[in-house]
Image (cartoon, grey):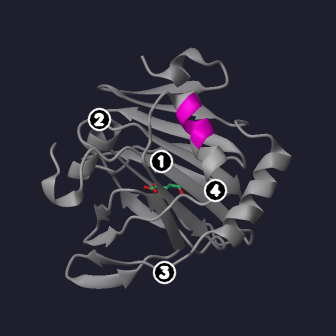
Amino acid sequence: MSKPADDDRFARRDLGKGAYVDYAARWLDEADGTALLAALIDGQAWSEVEIRAGDKTVVQPRLTAWAGELPYRYSGQTLDPRPVSAALRPLWERVVEDTGVDYNHAVLNYYRNGDDNMGMHADDEPQLGTNPTIAAVSLGAVRRFVLRPKGKKRYWVRYQLAHGSLLVMGGTTQHRWYHGVPKQPTTAEPRINVTFRRLLSPPDSGSGP
Ligand SMILES: O=C(O)CCC(=O)C(=O)O
């Protein structure tokens, strides 16, 4: 059993067929979260990342930064290795401690306002192997996070991801469900999400589904 299941700060939602989400709304103290948000906005190298979507190349509607010793390949592009910044390291150590997963890669998503968003997708790249556990810290504006089972269009699970929250997707979630962050045009404030993954191999020699 994963660590959050034994930790009463987390509420577990069983999504069925081996998929689950653990959510701790107040995982970080509010002031610590606010300081971290400012430090990450200033302390990361933010880029507009281009990805392949069908036969088109599109710029993702948000800014991206990342860290990790292995390249990470998704949506037709590769994030080359980058060192962990001083601002990110303590957060990383705390996530590893509280989830019991030895993450080796982080993607930071900077939603400048409610127009920035993330489309529905699954973190099911071969590099992540079978049933990866993905941990995501939210800082700043509260944004809606939605999950939908693959193959069903009308069934949604929704979270309002709070400032300082930690959400962990585990079990079969990446194989059976999509997730995303829709536009919220009335939101003016920025949000940063830091998503931790464990890459099992470099992109070209990936094993798994
Ligand atoms: O911003 C979020 O909460 C979601 C991030 C996400 O889905 C991802 O990085 O794959």
Judging from the image, what secondary structure is the residue with disc 4 in?
Answer: strand
Q: Is mark 4 within 8 Å of ligand 1?
A: yes
Judging from the image, what secondary structure is the residue with disc 2 in?
Answer: loop
> Looking at the figure, which quarter contains the C terminus?
top left
**Magenta segment range?**
93-97
Residue 173 position, x and y percent, is: 35, 37
Residues under numbered marks 2 and 1 in contact, where contact means CB atoms less than 8 Å apart: no
Which residue matches tag 4? 143
For badge 4, the amino acid type reads Arg
Judging from the image, what secondary structure is the residue with disc 1 in?
Answer: strand
What is the distance, in whole Å, between disc 2 and disc 4 at their CAs?
Answer: 25 Å
Please tell me which residue lies in front, 120 or 156: 120
Prevailing secondary structure of the magenta residues:
helix
Q: Which mark is residue 131?
A: 2
For badge 3, the amino acid type reads Glu
From what the image shows, is residue 84 above or below residue 113?
above
Which residue matches tag 3? 48
Q: Which is nearer the N-term, disc 2 or disc 1?
A: 2
Which residue matches tag 1? 196
- Quarter of the image holding residue 74? bottom left
What is the distance, in whole Å, between disc 4 and disc 1 at their CAs?
Answer: 18 Å
Tag in front: 4 or 1: 1
Residue at the location (67% across, 24% down)? 9
Tag in front: 3 or 4: 3
